Image (cartoon, coloured by chain):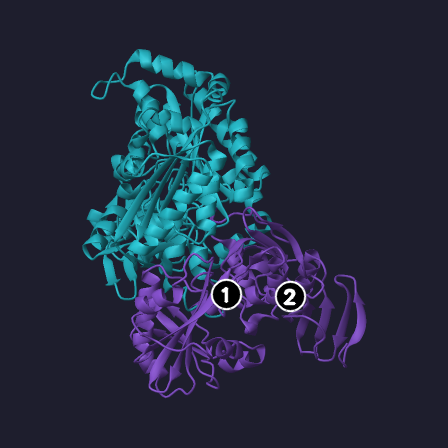
Chain colours: A cyan, B purple
């Protein structure tokens, strides 16, 4: 511990005593992110690995100093934004120092003429969007975690917002990055729109999940606030008909902000009130099972019912197949008036051709109002002795139906599963699976949980899909990463050797370490 | 075969030709042959040149003749994704998908004869299309040969979040980190209408402002560029459509805010500028920020702008000296990365 004590003293000397913490509550709080498996581990009595210290540097120079201090001692650093990651990417499983970037929160530059901002990595998503809104701008990046995630976290995990079909994922918005690498240097990547010889370094640091360096700031593209919005909602005969509408719009060159198609179970969960459809529609209904009423507490009876339903996933999923195949499609077009009118009109034509029953603009408007609700609904399900999680995969349009059916079949024996299709591109789309299950105890739940994940990702890979669209890899997909990348892993190892020669940045994430 | 070559056989790469001063040449017909050749060149410290057909020997370089590694493997017509071998030239690729009623978007004449593999290795930015992006942008999957002698693989998908986009290691990095051997590219329905709009402005910055407004309004020309016309600057745009926008030219003129100009010679002028023979002449470039175009263009004869973006543009000036490539920290990183890749293999 002597080495640790010396390091902490050095950190305090450089960053200040108010910005280094070694007390148990802080180390506990930073021992995990929002990966649901961490909760199952805790329920099973597994102690988390706490970091040696939590550090809040105040500027890139202090970040660089922390990196140099840790590199000299071979102490791991886990870069940390707001901890809303759901893959275990920010868990300090090897101890070391958690480097929280939230004091790096400046909006350094806003250039509405060039359509660019320069922002520091610790800026919270919602605060950034509010500040841009005051300037008549938007980043166009609205992940459901926007109130509890940072710009740095978005970049580290290749995040996607709900309007990605129009504005792209975060990697599409990056102009350049400021990064502190393992030698303690503060580096600026070449601009993506003026690349010289050499690879596009931006795209090698984006998605690196803290394994290659600490992203401290970024230049991002921004857009004027949309002048117009048009909302659409249709009940499609089945999910394939809904996919045909999404594909038709994207391949025509339109860029609707939102295209979300709920499968039959997710549509059913919305029930008689299709206007309540949002990302957490299914979770809302599961939560409803746990509550005596909107303002009542959870009841034992409802917990028992939920456990019974989730305890027989094969039966429950079979029953789901008897549901009407109808699927809810929600669309939002935004931008200048002419573009919005043309894109919405095309959606109307496509939906009519595919047999869609129009529902008016209500579903889209309600979705927009409640789109960030999903992140706060999981705890009730865990209280009932159950678990819930999500995973998102992506593939081309032609392969989507087989992927969707295949994953449901594979995961179905373990958990109740539903899905929605979103994040559409001309060539394909993402599927966002939500699954819920239970077990006799926490250990059994974890076993079921792991089996569901393994079955889902195995099947995705067997169908040629990518195993993550926007949540990242972290620990939850680590076992599948070698198969996902094959020999391209050698590039990653070379990048690691180049930018993190001491091997201190978030060790064991993305890929397992040698011998692990 | 061009004079100077001697047939040779090597156990590692098979049949090849050699010439004095360490020049070598090999034809590759399969992806694994590219991997073997890269490893062979790396072991001998040779540069790698991607070529098609016979060329004169280049000292200390392995010429990789990729002509046999050509063709369309498959087209996914639902997803509109073409799977192409990377020795295919862009013109060949466009012809192959055109036969299916599809397009890669505009293929400039200056890159028409370039193999896909070479464009990726160079990080080719010579197709700055607002509607279709750069030629190397629409990649859903890329398989590469590494200088360690192995092949990568990649799932076919529009986006992913499985760590860094490692395939970017071969885009713009020469052959030091690997070469693309086949790619899945986004393709589109062929347009049913193609028209050219010409809009005149008082100067470079005004023309760029007009272009930026068009982008903000959601207009996405298939191609565009700007040229000097006396004291004025003319913005030219190729507008491709499906016939649902009969007034595309009028709308483009209105949105950009300039004066409509006769477009008679625009298409011919553009085609001439994009002729492969002209490519070398206008390749030298200057990237200018928004508001700085007039200053950057001052004193340059025949200057043209071909990559108009929200935040600036790239100016091309025939005959101008290319700016020297400064070996900055990132270039050193590139070298270290290539070294680490080889060291890891060893």
**A477 lies above or below A285:** below
Residue contact at pointers 2 and 1, CB within 8 angstroms? no
Q: Can residue A53 be seen here?
A: no
Pick the front one: B122 or A367: A367
B170 displayed left or right of A249: right
Share a chain, discs 2 and 1? yes
The residue at 77%/81% (across/down) is: B3
Return the mark for residue B316.
Answer: none
- Crowdedness of circle 2 by 10 Å Cα count: few (<14), some, many (20+)? some
Task: Check disc 1 and report its element: helix, strand or loop.
Answer: helix
Q: To which chain does the residue with label 2 belong?
A: B
Dot 1 crowding, Cα within 10 Å, few <14, some 14–19, many 20+:
many
The residue that mark 2 highlights is B42
Q: Quadrant of the C terminus of chain B?
A: bottom right
Q: Quadrant of residue A470?
A: top left
Q: Which comes sooner in the sequence, label 2 or label 1? A: 2
Residues under labels 2 and 1: Cα distance?
A: 15 Å
Q: Is label 2 in a helix, a strand or a loop?
A: helix
Residue drawn at x 38%, y 63% is B247
Please say if A218 is above or below B312: above
Q: Is residue B193 above or below residue A7?
A: below
Q: Quadrant of the N terminus of chain B?
A: bottom right
Residue assigned mark 1: B334
Q: Position of residue A85 (x, y in %)?
A: 36, 40
Percent x, y for residue B229?
38, 84
Q: A331 left or right of A19?
A: right
* Residue A250, image x, y percentages: 45, 49
Chain at tag 1: B
Nearest the viewer among B326 and B321 is B321
The image shows residue A455 at horizontal and vertical percentages of 53, 30
Q: Is residue A138 visible in this depiction of the protein? A: yes
Looking at the image, the residue that sits furthest to the top is A301
């Amino acid at each position: 511990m002597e080495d640790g004590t010396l390091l902490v003293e050095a950190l305090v000397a450089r960053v200040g005593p108010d910005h280094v913490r070694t007390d148990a509550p802080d180390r506990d709080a930073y021992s995990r992110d929002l990966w649901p498996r961490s909760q199952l581990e805790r329920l099973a009595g597994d102690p988390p690995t706490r970091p040696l210290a939590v550090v809040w540097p105040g500027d890139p120079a202090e970040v660089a100093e922390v990196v140099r201090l840790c590199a000299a001692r071979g102490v791991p650093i886990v870069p940390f934004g707001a901890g809303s990651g759901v893959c275990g990417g920010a868990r300090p499983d090897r101890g070391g120092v958690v480097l929280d970037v939230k004091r790096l929160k400046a909006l350094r530059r806003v250039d509405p003429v060039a359509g660019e901002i320069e922002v520091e990595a610790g800026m919270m998503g919602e605060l950034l969007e509010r500040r841009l809104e005051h300037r008549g701008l938007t980043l166009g990046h609205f992940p459901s975690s926007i109130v509890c995630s940072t710009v740095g976290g978005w970049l580290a995990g290749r995040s996607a917002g709900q309007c990605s079909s129009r504005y792209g994922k975060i990697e599409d918005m990056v102009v350049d990055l400021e990064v502190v690498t393992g030698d303690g240097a503060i580096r600026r990547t070449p601009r993506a729109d003026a690349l010289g010889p050499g690879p596009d370094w931006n795209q090698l640091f984006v998605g690196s999940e803290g394994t290659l360096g600490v992203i401290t700031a970024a230049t991002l593209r921004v857009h004027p606030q949309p002048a117009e919005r048009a909302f659409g909602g249709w009940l499609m005969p089945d999910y394939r008909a809904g996919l045909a509408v999404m594909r038709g719009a994207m391949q025509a060159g339109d860029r609707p902000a939102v295209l979300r198609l709920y499968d039959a179970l997710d549509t059913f969960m919305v029930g008689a009130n299709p206007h309540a459809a949002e990302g957490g529609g299914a979770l809302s209904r599961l939560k409803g099972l746990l509550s005596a009423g909107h303002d009542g507490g959870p009841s034992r009876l409802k917990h028992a019912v939920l456990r019974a339903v989730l305890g027989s996933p094969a039966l429950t999923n079979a029953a789901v197949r008897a549901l009407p195949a109808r699927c809810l499609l929600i669309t939002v077009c935004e931008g200048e008036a002419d573009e919005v009118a043309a894109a919405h009109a095309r959606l109307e034509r496509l939906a009519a051709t595919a047999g869609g029953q129009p529902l008016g603009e209500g579903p889209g408007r309600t979705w927009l109002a409640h789109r960030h609700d999903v992140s706060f609904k999981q705890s009730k399900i865990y209280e009932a002795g159950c678990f819930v999680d999500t995973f998102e995969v992506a593939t081309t349009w032609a392969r989507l139906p087989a992927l969707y059916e295949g994953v449901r079949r594979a995961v179905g024996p373990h958990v109740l599963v539903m899905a929605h299709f979103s994040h559409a591109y001309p060539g394909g789309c993402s599927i966002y699976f939500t699954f819920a299950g239970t077990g006799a105890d926490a250990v059994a739940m974890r076993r079921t949980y792991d089996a569901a994940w393994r079955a889902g990702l195995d099947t995705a890979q067997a169908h040629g899909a990518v195993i993550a669209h926007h949540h990242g890899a972290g620990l939850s997909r680590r076992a599948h990463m070698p198969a996902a990348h094959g020999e391209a892993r050698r590039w990653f190892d070379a990048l690691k050797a180049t930018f993190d020669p001491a091997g201190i940045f978030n060790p064991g994430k993305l890929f397992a370490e040698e011998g692990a | 075969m061009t004079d100077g070559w001697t047939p040779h056989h090597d156990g590692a790469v098979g049949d090849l030709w050699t010439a004095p001063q360490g020049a070598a040449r090999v034809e590759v017909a399969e992806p694994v042959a590219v991997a073997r050749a890269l490893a062979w060149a790396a072991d001998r410290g040779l540069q790698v040149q991607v070529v098609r057909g016979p060329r004169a020997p280049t000292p200390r370089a392995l010429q990789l003749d990729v002509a046999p590694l050509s063709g369309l493997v498959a087209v996914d017509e639902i997803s509109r994704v073409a799977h192409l071998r990377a020795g295919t030239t862009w013109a060949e690729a466009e012809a192959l998908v055109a036969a299916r009623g599809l397009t890669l978007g505009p293929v400039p004449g200056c890159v028409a004869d370039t193999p896909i593999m070479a464009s990726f290795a160079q990080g080719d930015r010579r197709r700055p299309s607002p509607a279709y992006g750069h030629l190397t942008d629409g990649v859903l999957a890329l398989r590469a040969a590494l200088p360690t002698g192995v092949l990568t693989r990649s799932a076919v998908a529009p986006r992913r979040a499985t760590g860094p986009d490692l395939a970017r290691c071969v885009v713009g990095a020469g052959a030091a980190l690997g070469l693309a051997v086949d790619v899945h590219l986004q393709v589109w329905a062929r347009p049913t209408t193609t028209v050219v709009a010409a809009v005149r402005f008082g100067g470079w910055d005004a023309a760029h402002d007009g272009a930026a407004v068009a982008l903000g309004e959601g207009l996405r020309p298939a191609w565009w560029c700007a040229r000097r016309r006396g004291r004025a600057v003319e913005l030219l745009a190729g507008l491709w459509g499906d016939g649902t926008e009969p007034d595309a030219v009028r709308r483009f003129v209105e949105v950009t805010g300039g004066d409509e100009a006769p477009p008679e010679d625009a298409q011919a002028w553009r085609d001439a500028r994009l002729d492969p023979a002209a490519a070398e002449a206008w390749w030298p470039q200057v990237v200018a920020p928004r508001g700085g175009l007039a200053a950057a263009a001052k004193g340059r004869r025949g200057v043209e702008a071909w990559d108009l973006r929200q935040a600036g543009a790239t100016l091309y000036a025939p005959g101008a000296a290319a700016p020297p490539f400064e070996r900055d920290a990132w270039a050193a990183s590139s070298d270290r990365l290539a070294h680490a890749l080889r060291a890891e293999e060893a």
